[in-house]
Amino acid sequence: MKFTPEPIPRPAGRPASSTPLRDYLNSTGQGVDAGYAVVPRSLAESMPLPWQQQFATLLAEFHQAFAHLQWPVYRVVPSRYERLVDLDEEQLAEAGYLMEIDSDGEIVYRGRNGAPVDNPEQTTALVSVLDPLPSNRHARVEPAASAQPPTPPGGFPVSPAQPGPAQPRPTPPAGAFPAQPGPPATPPGGFGPQGHHRYPSAPDQPSW
């Protein structure tokens, strides 16, 4: 073996990740928080049939793997983050805050522990809102026709390359006949093309 002082070249591209699902969920904010990933049924059931078949197979494997656990019933509440100064008293109470007016006539926001919030204009709280997505009781939701696959984080497989345009066949010179395929070769034993047999010809009759 020949020794070389040159460093071993590393493969091009980013290394594959050992936590691809976590990487993707951390990179999106669509129905994902630190503990859960929500998939609206109305949107999932509106995807093309091949996608639904693959997704159903993955979900069945997932549920089978953790069927031994005691699963609760989850109640999903559509919510979004809003500034404290944009919330009313009911929304503040839902988020665990209180608004009051001090002796100087200033509005003071307090948390659950009674401590005042120093910067309520920049402090946000998660409050419930009306669901902007259609429910599964409505008709099918058409996916965006112009939607392109998102760029995945490092370690995700790259989508297969699309085949290029067909290369044109060479044109024979003017006046020349195109090459024709020759007859199939006869294998040993006298057999012709597949499905046909070549029988030996009858022997020549002697002439008297």
Image (cartoon, rainbow, N blue to C red):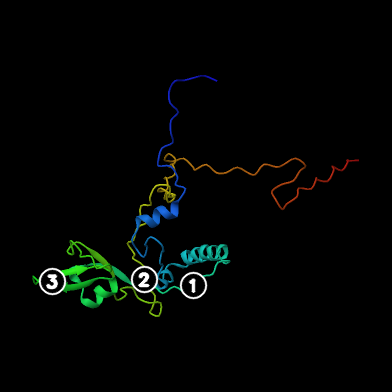
Q: Residues within 10 Å of mark 3 (few under 14, many from 20)?
A: few
Which circle, 1 or 2, is nearer the viewer?
1
Between the C-alphas of marks 1 and 3, the distance is 44 Å
Give the residue at x 39% y 55%.
Answer: 24
Specify the amino acid type for callout 1: Pro
Residue 43, above or below 173: below
Specify the amino acid type for callout 3: Asp
Regarding residue 128, the answer to whether it shows in the image is no
Specify the amino acid type for callout 2: Glu
- Identify the residue position indicated by label 1 in the image: 72
Between the C-alphas of marks 3 and 2, the distance is 52 Å
Tag 1–tag 2 contact (CB < 8 Å): no
In the rendered structure, the answer to whether residue 27 lies left or right of residue 194 reads left
Examine the image and state in which quarter residue 8 appears: top left
Label 2, secondary structure: give it: loop
Picture disc at residue 102: 3
The image position of residue 55, as x and y in percent, is 49, 64
Picture disc at residue 142: 2
- In terms of sequence position, does the residue under pointer 1 or pointer 2 come before the other? 1
The image position of residue 15, as x and y in percent, is 43, 42
Between the C-alphas of marks 1 and 2, the distance is 32 Å
Examine the image and state in which quarter residue 100 appears: bottom left
Tag 3–tag 2 contact (CB < 8 Å): no
- In terms of sequence position, does the residue under pointer 1 or pointer 3 come before the other? 1
Q: Residue furthest left?
A: 104
Which circle, 3 or 2, is nearer the viewer?
3
Dividing the image into 4 quarters, which one contains the N terminus? top right
Q: Residues within 10 Å of mark 2 (few under 14, many from 20)?
A: few
Dividing the image into 4 quarters, which one contains the C terminus? top right
Picture disc at residue 153: none
Give the residue at x 36% y 52%.
Answer: 151
